[in-house]
Amino acid sequence: MRVGMLTGGGDCPGLNAVIRAVVRKGEVGYGDSFVGFLDGWEGVMDNRSTDLDVERCRGILPRGGTILGTSRTNPYKVDGGVARCLATLRSQRIDALVAIGGDDTLGVAHRLSGEGVAVVGVPKTIDNDLSATEVTFGFHTAVQIATDAIDRLHTTAESHDRVIVCEVMGRNAGWIATYAGIAGGAAEILVPEEPFDIDVICAKLKNRHAKGRFASIVVVAEGAVPADGSLTLASAELDQFGHPRLGGIANVLAGEIEKRTGFETRVTLLGHVQRGGSPTAFDRILATRFGIAAIDAVHDGDFSTMVALQADKIVRVPLSEAVSVAKQVDPDLLHGVAEVFWG
Ligand code: F6P
């Protein structure tokens, strides 16, 4: 078969491991040839591609990013975008497409499957907010990076007896904040799922510091919002999928904490450091399993599906299910585990 592949949305450690696995199993196991579309759906729209084979994929397993490039382009938001995608797939004689991405990229894949495109999805996002899979690759790498950073923030915060607000990624869900906060011993974790009350946070910090020299690390997900509108957040620019470009809640929060408590407070925004660099062993293995399962699904003719991890087995779920609901942080994890160590 002639199989097209693309990576869309924010990049994520492990994308290259998926590409390598799809190509390896496809070429050696099934005799497939591959076309790699560049920069996500943009490359499909513009018919920009590169040949992919086992030789081209040598050495990419531990490399972060994606050799195919990525973008947040949405063909459904571009005049004639969908027709251009279909024309490219026809002219390139693509029998099946493997789309590697988060809810946006897979949402487009799902809509294109309604136009007759034979597509299999592979879930990707450091945010871990796709509902049909227990975990996405890239998440564990991001959590490890954030945890390492929090460990470092602890020693400097302790030396100065300061509060440090550490902002991590997580637009709609606070998985990175919760995991890294638990692993790093955060004094407070703020997530998008539960709007925060600045008065409550400051009271808890005062209580904690009243007991002696207690440096505090407050971990906040970039998508966290204040409960009562008491803090004003600048409105953000939107991308083609309608998502705001976030980043900066920690600055607002830190200023407010310092003003209300009198504790010296500093800010660290981890930003794209969390998405860069080499995937952890866990993410390399998950990405490899997903890649092999995706090309197997192509050869089973099991299209309009996404590969997913459930009970440590790789399964196939309908794409419609994969993109329907964002997976939110389990309140039991946040309150039953993380909160035991707050205040
Ligand atoms: O891919 C998800 C994500 O990492 C979010 O956590 C974050 O809000 C967003 O991407 C940042 O996107 P960009 O790199 O386009 O600024």
Image (spheres, rainbow, N blue to C red):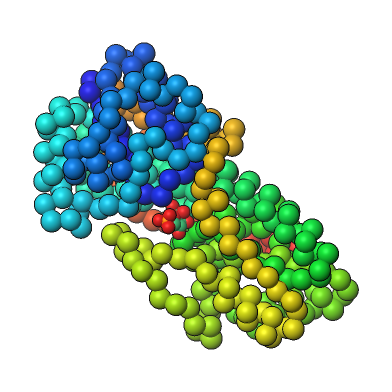
Identify the residue shown where x is 53% and y is 57%.
271
Question: On the image, which quarter does residue 45 sit in?
Answer: top left
User: Can see residue 243?
Assistant: yes
Q: Specify the farthest residue to the right.
A: 212
Residue 227 in the image: state x and y as whole percent. 53, 79
- Residue placed at 68% from the left, 49% from the top? 148
Above or below 246: residue 22: above
Quarter of the picture holding the C terminus = bottom right
Front in this rendered view, residue 330 or 246? 246
Q: Reply above or below: 126 against 270.
A: above
Residue 315 appears in the rendering: no
Question: On screen, 103 above or below 265?
Answer: above
In the picture provided, is 123 more to the left or to the right than 285?
left
- Picture layout, residue 90 above or below residue 58: below
Q: Is residue 341 left or right of residue 15?
A: right
Q: Quadrant of the N terminus?
A: top left
* Quarter of the image where ligand 1 sits: bottom left
Image position, residue 237 (x, y; %): 36, 69
Residue 222, given in percent of the width and then of the height, sits at 52, 65
Residue that appears at 33% across and 66% down: 238
Residue 341 image-quadrant placement:
bottom right
Q: In the drawing, does residue 227 fall left or right of residue 302?
A: right
In this orientation, which residue lies closer to the viewer: 61 or 106? 61
Q: Tag count in the figure?
A: 0
* Percent coordinates x, y for residue 203 in the rendering: 72, 81
Left or right side of 300 for 17:
right
**Foreground residue among 56 and 12:** 56
Which residue is located at x 25 percent, y 53 percent?
A: 74
